[in-house]
């Protein structure tokens, strides 16, 4: 990955060069650091290799101090360096050093502090650009198309085991884009009706007459233009499952007809005189609270009791942010078009993930899926890393869009700050979580949980 392209690195480099005429560099542990400062270059010719010795000594210092360090070099200049740490599982190892070398020893303490801050911010940016570690789920189940590990998702999946076997009507309640249709499909395709049709109709999509005709069909001559008998979707779904989306938007008249299907298994086509028998399992979904609609007499109570036999509540994504890393990863794989060369899908950087986790996702999982598709398109086919700058401004919250889009709940701001603080502290302490917990004055367990939730590392003890 090209760290020089990171804005924080470019900014730090530019300021260091202009104010102190020193250079910022990133040195891997294996390679010899480039030394560009004139005075330092002269000293190097006198004693070849000593600058590299200084940086090697720094690596040893980091192992103990775990902090931004200032050391004098053999030529009487200063080196300011910050460690870049790689965390894999519970293990952290030094991956490289960001350093400004060749600072005149006479530099004032105030100026040195500013240099340290610049080097530190560059090192933090490099840290954030590193790939996020997304822990594999420990929750194994049959419904692999449903990704997620949050307690609420586990509850839904556990319930599915029972729901699938039964023939009862199911009501799925949840905001738009939370996965209601995905769950309905899972119930159908994992159940005994799997080989029969799965039919979907959104009840708010049409006007009343069109919806009635679409659901129940019509007979020839029922209305102008009805030139022949037309079976409805309930007949198409015969033997299978009917997913009635946004059932709360159904008119009172249609609610009566639907009740009849549920009670007697019969329906009457528009303009018809003979009722037709159908065998359909109904799964209904609504983002509205049907119980409240019943209380306000906007929804028939008898239909409500028929529909609400088994209820599944799908939480909004903002209430299960711990699943965002895994879902983001899932959508990268899902939408990655492998090229002829079979390039693996790009990885998500820690910084990009921190922004995704911080967003409130009013459009829920559908919005996250769209965002990941957008990032993949933006990144192109030869990118290996999806970095923070590729997150759309609306999601990243940095301007753009309407005033409504720019609103940032305190929760989001806190999540960004939290992620930044943890990343910085992990860097300072070379991944030692005990020390990070101590510094941040939080419990070790909470720290581990937040590291996993923010995609900054794996749970302790997990091999990776
Ligand atoms: N838990 C999940 N795991 C994987 N993909 C999901 C999950 N929940 C939703 N999706 C995907 O998000 C998109 C929107 O879900 P959908 O079921 O249409 O939501 P809803 O019916 O509640 O509006 C779909 O592409 C769906 O496959
Ligand atoms: Mg939907």
Image: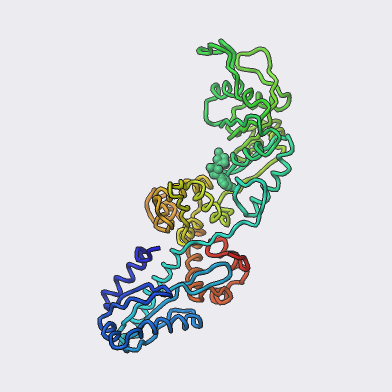
Q: Residue at x 71, y 39 (%)?
A: 164
- Give residue 125's quadrant in the image: bottom left
Quadrant location, the C terminus: bottom right
The total of numbered circles placed on residues is 0
Q: Nearer the viewer, residue 245 or 378?
A: 378
**Residue at the limit of the structure toward the front, as seen here:** 341
Rendered-image quarter of ligand 2: top right
**How far across and how far down the image is residue 397, in percent?**
42, 55
Left or right: residue 360 versus residue 300 is left
**How far across and how far down the image is residue 64, in percent?**
51, 83
Q: Nearer the viewer, residue 40 or 117?
A: 40
**How far across and how far down the image is residue 462, in percent?**
62, 65
Quadrant location, the N terminus: bottom left
Question: From what the image shows, is residue 102 above or below residue 336?
Answer: below
Q: Residue at x 42, y 58 (%)?
A: 387
- Give residue 262's quadrant in the image: top right
**How far across and how far down the image is residue 291, in percent?**
66, 39
Left or right: residue 191 versus residue 75 is right
Question: From what the image shows, is residue 18 above or below residue 168?
Answer: below
Asked if residue 194 shows in the view, the reply is yes
- Give residue 4's quadrant in the image: bottom left
Asked if residue 177 shows in the view, the reply is no
Question: From what the image shows, is residue 378 above or below residue 39?
Answer: above
Q: Residue at x 40, y 78 (%)?
A: 81
């Amino acid at each position: 990955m090209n760290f020089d392209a990171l804005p924080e690195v470019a900014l730090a480099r530019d300021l260091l060069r202009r104010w102190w005429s020193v250079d910022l560099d990133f040195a891997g542990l294996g390679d010899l650091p480039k030394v560009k400062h004139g005075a330092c270059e002269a000293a190097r010719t006198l004693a070849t290799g000593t600058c590299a010795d200084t940086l090697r000594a720094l690596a040893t210092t980091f192992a103990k101090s775990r902090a931004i360090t200032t050391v004098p070099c053999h030529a009487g200049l200063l080196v300011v360096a910050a460690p870049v740490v790689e965390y894999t599982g519970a293990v952290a190892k030094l991956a490289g050093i960001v350093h400004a070398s060749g600072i005149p020893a006479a530099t004032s303490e105030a100026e040195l502090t500013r240099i340290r801050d610049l080097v530190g911010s560059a090192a933090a940016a490099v840290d954030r650009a590193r790939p996020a570690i997304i822990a594999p789920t420990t929750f194994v189940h049959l419904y692999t198309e449903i990704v997620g590990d949050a307690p609420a998702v586990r509850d839904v999946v556990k319930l599915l085991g029972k729901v699938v076997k039964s023939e009862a009507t199911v009501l799925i309640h949840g905001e738009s884009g939370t996965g209601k249709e995905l769950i309905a499909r899972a119930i159908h395709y994992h159940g005994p009706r799997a080989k029969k049709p799965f039919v979907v109709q959104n009840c708010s999509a049409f006007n009343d007459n069109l919806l009635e005709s679409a659901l129940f069909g019509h007979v020839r001559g029922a209305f102008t233009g009805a030139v022949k008998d037309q079976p409805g979707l309930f007949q198409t779904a015969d033997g299978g499952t009917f997913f009635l989306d946004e059932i709360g938007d159904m008119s009172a008249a249609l609610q009566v007809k639907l009740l009849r299907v549920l009670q007697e298994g019969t329906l009457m086509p528009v303009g018809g005189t003979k009722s037709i028998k159908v065998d359909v399992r109904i799964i209904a979904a609504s983002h509205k609270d049907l119980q409240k609609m019943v209380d306000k007499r906007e929804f028939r109570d008898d239909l409500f009791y028929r529909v609400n036999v088994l209820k599944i509540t799908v939480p909004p994504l903002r209430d299960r942010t711990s699943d965002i890393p895994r879902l983001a990863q899932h959508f990268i794989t899902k939408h990655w078009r492998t090229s002829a060369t079979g390039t693996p899908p790009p990885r998500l950087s820690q910084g990009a993930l921190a922004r995704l986790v911080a967003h409130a996702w009013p459009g829920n999982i559908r919005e996250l899926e769209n965002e990941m598709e957008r990032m993949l398109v933006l990144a192109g086919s030869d990118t290996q890393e999806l970095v923070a700058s590729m997150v759309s401004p609306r999601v990243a919250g940095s301007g753009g869009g309407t005033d409504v889009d720019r609103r940032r709940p305190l929760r989001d701001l806190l999540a960004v700050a939290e992620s930044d603080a943890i990343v910085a502290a992990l860097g300072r302490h070379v991944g030692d979580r005990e020390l990070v917990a101590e510094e941040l004055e939080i419990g070790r367990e909470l720290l581990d949980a937040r590291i996993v939730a923010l995609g900054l590392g794996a749970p302790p003890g997990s091999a990776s």
